[in-house]
Amino acid sequence: MKKLELSDDQVKRYSRHILLPEVGGKGQRKILEGRVLVIGTGGLGAPVSFYLAAAGVGTIGLVDSDTVEVSNLQRQIIHFTHDIGKHKTDSAREKMEALNPDIKVVVHKTRVSSENILSIIADYDVVVDGSDNFPTRYLVNDACVLSGKPLSHGGIFRFDGQVTTIVPGKGPCYRCLFPEPPPPGLVPSCQEAGILGVVAGTIGVAQATEVLKLLIGIGEPLIGRLLVYNALEMKFRTVKVPKNPQCPVCGPHPTITELIDYEEFCSLRS
Amino acid sequence: MGVKVRIPTPLQALTGNNAEVVAAGGTVQEVIDSLEAQYSGLKERICDEAGKVRRFVNIYVNEEDIRFLQGETTPLKDGDEISIIPAIAGGA
Ligand SMILES: [Zn+2]
């Protein structure tokens, strides 16, 4: 690959990164060469894609099939009131390009499925899961494991958040942590639960942090660790996530060798 | 022996909105039974019909997942803290 030289404008724009010895011009070039796919342009996807755009991630893919609704605006800060009714990927792309003309935003106006996910993630270095349902989360995990793509996983629920970083071959996957999704109806998900809007920001920014660390190659990503956050207590804790030798997808004797479309089970989902 | 148990948000409706409760027991299994005795209905949210911890719920003794210790029979000692952490899917 041709070595990217920073322009004068880029040296100014990213000066606060370049000042950091751990990042420097070299790290900033890695960010600019980075290709990151953000699945979902909602509560988590909004802060993730906004911050990655600001940081100068060269190519950012956005996957979403929804349009902006007024009830999104309490937390999905990349969408504005005048965007109501607009496609979320278009709304997000406009803000990201306005924030940073340096970057390329690729929109995928679709929902990921077993049919399309492998070809969508193929073009990216890192995948961010900002989806809002178990079937998509297990699909994204399995697809990343099968194609060896690093994945930042984040989940939010009311006042709680969870973040972990999955690097296939290096650490455990989401199924090592939770082998199977809950059956339909057992766990409240999505709209019925409510979410304190800022929790999406806290967790999304933690995911964006992990992505930048992976792109630059610094620090200790949340590999083999689950970060657990509660906003009411304002406490972050981490628990250990060992690699499960019986993991159905990343273990030595996998039983899942192709992608599964689990039944969508949130009855309130529109 | 009493141990502190951290209750996740989705289950706090069953513990009178308490995020942290105290349960008795020398093993994880005894603590689950002690929780059920205090807060009826909690056990079936954590365990399946056979009494095994559900595959989308994890129980940690301090930082360690009991599936990688001795499962439900994992012994507890004074000062251990138990956390129940379910998978959460929200993101929008
Ligand atoms: Zn695994």
Image (cartoon, coloured by chain):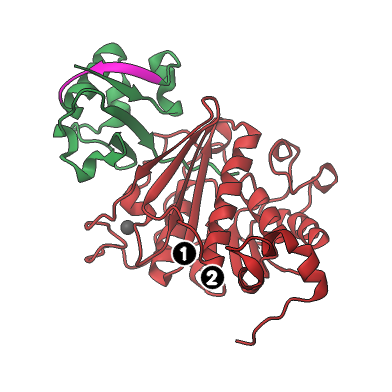
- Report the front residue among A270 and A145: A145
Q: Which chain is red?
A: A
What's the CA distance linking mark 1 and mark 2?
7 Å
Q: Which mark is residue A125?
A: 2
Mark 2 and mark 1 in contact (Cβ < 8 Å)?
Answer: yes
Q: Residue furthest right?
A: A82
Asked if one can make out residue A261 in the rendered structure from this viewpoint, the answer is no
Q: Residue furthest bottom?
A: A2
Badge 2 sits on which subunit?
A: A
Q: Which contiguous range is marked in magenta?
A: B20-26
Asked if one can make out residue B17 in the rendered structure from this viewpoint, the answer is yes
- Report the front residue among A69 and A159: A159
Q: On the image, numbered disc 1 is attached to which residue?
A: A150
Do dots 1 and 2 share one subunit?
A: yes
Q: Which mark is residue A19?
A: none
Give amino acid for label 1: Pro
Q: Residue at x 32, y 23 (%)?
A: B5
Q: Does residue A28 lie above or below B69 as drawn?
A: below
Q: Residue at x 54, y 46 (%)?
A: A132
Tint applied to chain B in the drawing = green
- Report the front residue among A144 and B6: B6
- Ligand 1 shows up in the quarter that is bottom left
Badge 1 sits on which subunit?
A: A
Residue A68: in magenta span:
no
Give amino acid for label 2: Asp
Q: x, y percentage for residue A85?
A: 79, 48
Q: x, y percentage for residue A194?
A: 58, 30
The verdict on label 1 being within 8 Å of ligand 1 is no
Q: Residue at x 17, y 22 (%)?
A: B30
Q: Residue A23 sits in which quadrant?
A: bottom right
Q: Earlier in the sequence, mark 1 or mark 2?
A: 2
In this rendering, position of residue B70 left or right of residue A143: left
